[in-house]
Amino acid sequence: MFLIGIDIGTTSVCGVLYDPLQDKVVKERHAENHFLPGEGFRQDPEELVRISQSLLEGLLASICPEGVDSPESGESSGPQIGGIGISAQMHGILYVDQNGKAVSPFYTWKNEWGNESYQAGKTYAQYLSEQTGMDLYAGYGSVTHFYLQKKGLIPQDAAAFVNIGDYLAMVLTNTFEALADVTIAASFGGFDLKKRQFALSAMETAGVDISYYPAVTEGKAVGTYQGVPVFTAVGDNQASFLGAVKDKERSVSVNVGTGSQVSVFSGELYETGKGEVRPFPGGGWLYVGASVNGGKVYERLAVFVREILEAFGISVEQAAVYEVMEGLGRTKEATNLQVIPALYGEREKGRDEGAILQTGIFGLTEENFHIADLIRGFVSGMAGELYALYQGLPEELRMGKTYVTASGNGIRKNPLLQEEIEKLYKLPVVFTDREEEAAAGAAIMAGTLVGKERNTHEK
């Protein structure tokens, strides 16, 4: 029996076929994802569903050309699919009507409208944080919802908001109820971790219209797709951890995609003033230091190098630029050129303020004014930001770690960044044999839930 995992990322969508007996991904399918024109970092939910369903159908057809046999039927002429798990980029929301139909774009985690001025010199995010006593940032679903509410931009026929992964589950199973797994719900902000529920009273007191919030659940089968259970979507950070980390007690997880995160697991809930605490599938918590700067930062450096080459009439493919940069970076094992490549700002400050205050190149001298130093300085700065986030986590969580599990193409395809991570953490960097960790984690999660569906948290 196989399991399927679908991961809806910021720039791509991936589907995997996972064999739990071999603990191995046996097939992968990929597609690109794009933003809609205009401001707001919005995406088309119907297009994302179309892409995801196409990948799903391709995986099903690859092993079951004539359709899927229901796991409950007891009859099978070939391989069976035990369950379908979904992983999705967190924080973002879209609105659905009472029939479960999308009536808005998907406002992603990159949406910055919450950083606009609201009142008394405070932004929408700052106002909500002050009123609720919780950390709420631009891009969080609750902040985006509050902004749209105050601007009068919530569609008239909207009945609830959900994450894109939730919407995919609704479409696949033809269900109308707005549900969010606790791992996704917490990412919206305005969430009570101890109760594992939205802090609706605090949000309502702050002026947020709470009638649109979805019901919170854990480990629930939303319905079936061709007889196969489809489970509520989980956060891509948790799914990536689940798909990559073999020993969650001893590993530090570093994920570098469009953004980046450093995560550690604990079965205990600690009070911490830094980072984020995210519910983990099946129980426990992930303590996360998240950055809006990830692989996109290094990509911008590669674009800069390519622009210089083309200015001199040298045409080169982008992939070749990365190879040249790696070779140049290896000629400089260390540099005293300090680079803080916070090109996309800091979540706490917002893009513009963060970029002005944080991004910089320091200690430039005649001796280190070389491209090799700049490349090494860039990856060192990227690693340094993640390490600072890690150091901000409670000391109890950092004890007993023996290795760093790396995931995401932003580090998998950047050996220089791997080297800098090892230097700072003083731990070896290891990878799993699964390159699509979030999709694999979604499949693994589905496997643990087959036959154990439950709905322990009602709205």
Image: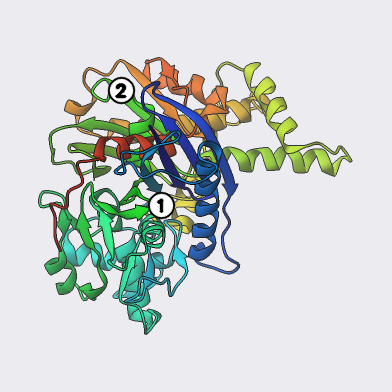
Quarter of the picture holding the N terminus:
top left
Query: Where does the image place residue 18, in percent across and percent down from the top left?
Result: 43, 32
Q: Is residue 104 left or right of residue 85?
A: right
Marks 2 and 1 sit apart, C-alpha to C-alpha, by 38 Å
Q: Is residue 167 left or right of residue 370?
A: left
Q: Is residue 63 left or right of residue 459?
A: right
Q: Residues within 10 Å of mark 1 (few under 14, many from 20)?
A: some
Secondary structure beneath label 2: strand
Residue at 44% in and 73% down: 104
Residue 226: image tag: 1
Secondary structure beneath label 1: loop
Q: Residues within 10 Å of mark 2 (few under 14, many from 20)?
A: many
Q: Quadrant of residue 113?
A: bottom left
| Nearer the camera: disc 2 or disc 1 | 1
Vertical comparison of 155 with 284: above or below? below
Vertical comparison of 189 with 301: above or below? below
Q: Quadrant of residue 400?
A: top left
Query: Where does the image place residue 258, in percent across and percent down from the top left?
Result: 50, 44
Give the amino acid at mark 2. Ser
Q: Quadrant of residue 243?
A: top left
Which of the two residues, 449 or 141, is positioned nearer the viewer here?
Answer: 449
Query: Where does the image place residue 286, in percent across and percent down from the top left?
Result: 25, 37
Residue at 12% in and 34% down: 268
Vertical comparison of 301 with 373: above or below? below
| Residue 281 can be seen in this image | yes
